[in-house]
Image (spheres, grey):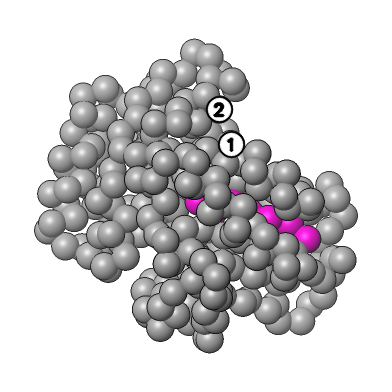
């Protein structure tokens, strides 16, 4: 059981930032990643559709014999966590609660901003998670739907990205926040543009590292750590365009990823 992989899924490429954090913190763990690239993005879709997609995504990971499921998609974490928990039959870690905890630790003024997809922001999941922990924290949310395609186009340092970031984030600058949650796993790739549009004293919270810490704690609690010192196996599956996923994904993963497999039926 301990040698079985951790399953990670996302609507597309962004979840590779979580895989990167997991590999850095848990270098012995085998990982299976699924990106639903045929149906990305999930953010603008209805909660009903996202829940249907989440069921199919987790069923695929379960078929690969995973010992844990990590939801690397903020949209799924916001509107379909219960679906994944009910179908996975293994421990599940999602991105929202770890990111909320990290933001509460970071904020000094108890003024926290959240940026994410339309679905994530409309769900209020981050605000709810934060207020459950500390009701005194004020939360300000902003949907940034164009950030996902900009990240996937690789327009990291493009002037268009800088202009879009300033436009989206200007309302949050007026709220005098001191902490900003990057509430989508694509957004860390655009960290430079986001930081440039904010006050330099604002702390940016990338939930990937927080998720990795929660996964480590869950593995220890369940005694599921992989004791092997052999090089871990990382497998990547997508529902469409493996070559494009590999080309763009290495920017998110921070390393070469080898072969990417296409899965039919999505």
Tell me which residue sits at (68%, 79%) in the image: 233
Tell me which residue sits at (50%, 72%) in the image: 238
The crowding category of the residue bearing disc 2, from other C-alpha atoms within 10 Å (few below 14, some 14 to 19, many at least 20), is some
Quarter of image, res 113? top left
Q: Residue furthest bottom?
A: 259
- Horizontal placement of 189 versus 34: left or right? left
The crowding category of the residue bearing disc 1, from other C-alpha atoms within 10 Å (few below 14, some 14 to 19, many at least 20), is many
The residue indicated by pointer 1 is: 97
Q: Nearer the viewer, residue 160 or 109?
A: 160
Q: Residue furthest top?
A: 136
* Residue 169 spot, x, y in % from top left: 23, 37
Q: Is residue 137 above or below residue 102?
A: above
Q: Secondary structure at mark 1?
A: helix
Q: Nearer the viewer, residue 120 or 54?
A: 54
* Residue 93 spot, x, y in % from top left: 66, 47
Which mark sits nearer the N-terminus, 2 or 1? 1
Q: Is residue 246 visible?
A: no
The residue indicated by pointer 2 is: 129
Q: Nearer the viewer, residue 81 or 247?
A: 81
* Residue 251 spot, x, y in % from top left: 38, 71
Q: Is residue 264 visible?
A: yes
Q: Quadrant of the N terminus?
A: bottom right
Q: Is residue 31 above or below residue 200?
A: below
Tell me which residue sits at (67%, 64%) in the image: 61
- Horizontal placement of 174 versus 117: left or right? left
* Residue 221 spot, x, y in % from top left: 84, 47
């Amino acid at each position: 059981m301990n040698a079985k992989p951790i399953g990670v899924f996302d609507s597309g490429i962004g979840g590779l930032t979580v895989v990167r954090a997991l590999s850095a913190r848990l270098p012995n763990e085998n990982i299976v990643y699924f990106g639903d690239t045929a149906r990305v993005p999930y953010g603008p879709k209805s909660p009903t559709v996202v829940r249907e997609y989440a069921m199919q995504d987790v069923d695929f990971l379960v078929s690969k014999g995973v010992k844990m499921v990590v939801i690397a998609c903020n949209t799924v974490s916001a509107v379909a966590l219960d679906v994944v928990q009910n179908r996975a039959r293994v421990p599940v870690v999602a991105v929202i609660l770890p990111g909320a905890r990290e933001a509460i630790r970071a904020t000094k003024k108890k003024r926290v901003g959240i940026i994410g997809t339309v679905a994530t922001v409309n769900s209020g999941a981050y605000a709810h998670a934060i207020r459950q922990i500390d009701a005194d924290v004020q939360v300000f949310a902003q949907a940034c739907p164009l950030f996902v395609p900009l990240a996937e186009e690789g327009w990291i340092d493009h002037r268009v990205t800088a202009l879009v970031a300033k436009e989206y984030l200007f309302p949050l600058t007026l709220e005098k926040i001191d902490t900003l949650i990057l509430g989508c796993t694509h957004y860390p790739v655009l960290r430079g543009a986001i930081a440039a549009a904010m006050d330099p004293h604002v702390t940016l919270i990338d939930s990937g590292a927080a998720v990795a810490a929660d996964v480590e704690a869950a593995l220890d609690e369940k005694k599921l750590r992989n004791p092997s010192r052999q090089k871990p196996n990382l497998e990547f599956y997508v529902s469409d365009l493996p070559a494009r996923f590999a080309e763009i994904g290495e920017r998110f993963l921070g390393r070469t990823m080898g072969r990417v497999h296409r899965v039919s039926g999505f």
